[in-house]
């Protein structure tokens, strides 16, 4: 009889618990929290590359047959203005000159690479007024 009473008591407890859980009002659902990730990256700036060879010809057109108009040196930073069949029209960041260069010798500038600082052109030295030539003394 004891086992039968224990089972009945346990069944009554489970039913009471189920009834109690069904009667309890839960509050309003929690507000929807939208997970926001990191802010979107800024719009891409100019495509910066650096020269990975000791000397790179800057040409008038996208071919080796085009006349050479200058030279880019190792680690010079350039901005890609347009591309054409493995060639890039580049703007030399430090010298403010443009031309075509082979993309084979250009590598993208990594985000953590220190940026080069454009060279400042020295200000022209102030000209001193011309001194008149000394007059010879009579003897």
Image (cartoon, grey):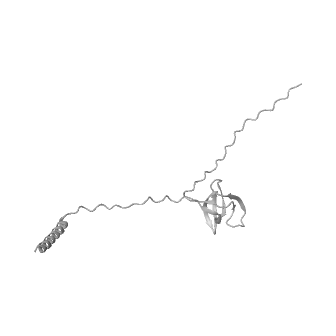
Closer-to-camera residue (80/116): 116
Residue at 72% x, 61% y: name it: 68
Q: State whether residue 62 is above or below residue 139.
A: below
Residue closest to the far front: 2
- Outermost residue on the top side: it is 139
Camera-side residue: 60 or 37? 37
Residue 93 x %, y %? 62, 55
Q: Quadrant of residue 122?
A: top right
Q: Is residue 127 left or right of residue 20?
A: right
Identify which residue is drawn at 19% across, 66% down: 21
Residue 85 place in picture, x, y as percent: 63, 69
The outermost residue toward the left is 1
Q: How many marks?
A: 0
**Quadrant where the C terminus is found in the figure:** top right
Of 75 and 79, the residue lying toward us: 75
Q: Is residue 29 left or right of residue 50?
A: left
- Quadrant of the rendering where the N terminus is positioned: bottom left
Q: Is residue 14 left or right of residue 68?
A: left
x, y (%) of residue 28? 25, 61
Depicted 136 relative to depicted 75: above or below: above
Residue 114, quarter of the rendered image: bottom right
Residue 118 location, x and y as percent?
62, 51
């Amino acid at each position: 009889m004891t086992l039968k009473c224990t089972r009945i008591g346990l069944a009554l407890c489970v039913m009471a618990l189920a009834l109690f859980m069904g009667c309890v009002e839960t509050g309003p659902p929690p507000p929807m929290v939208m997970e926001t990730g990191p802010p979107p990256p800024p719009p891409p700036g100019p495509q910066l590359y650096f020269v990975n060879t000791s000397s790179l010809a800057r040409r008038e057109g996208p071919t080796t047959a085009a006349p050479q108009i200058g030279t880019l040196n190792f680690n010079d930073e350039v901005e890609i203005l347009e591309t054409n069949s493995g060639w890039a029209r580049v703007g030399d960041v430090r010298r403010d000159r443009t031309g075509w260069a082979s993309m084979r010798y250009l590598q993208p500038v990594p985000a953590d690479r220190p940026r080069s600082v454009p060279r400042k052109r020295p200000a022209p030295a102030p000209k001193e007024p011309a001194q008149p030539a000394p007059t010879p003394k009579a003897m």
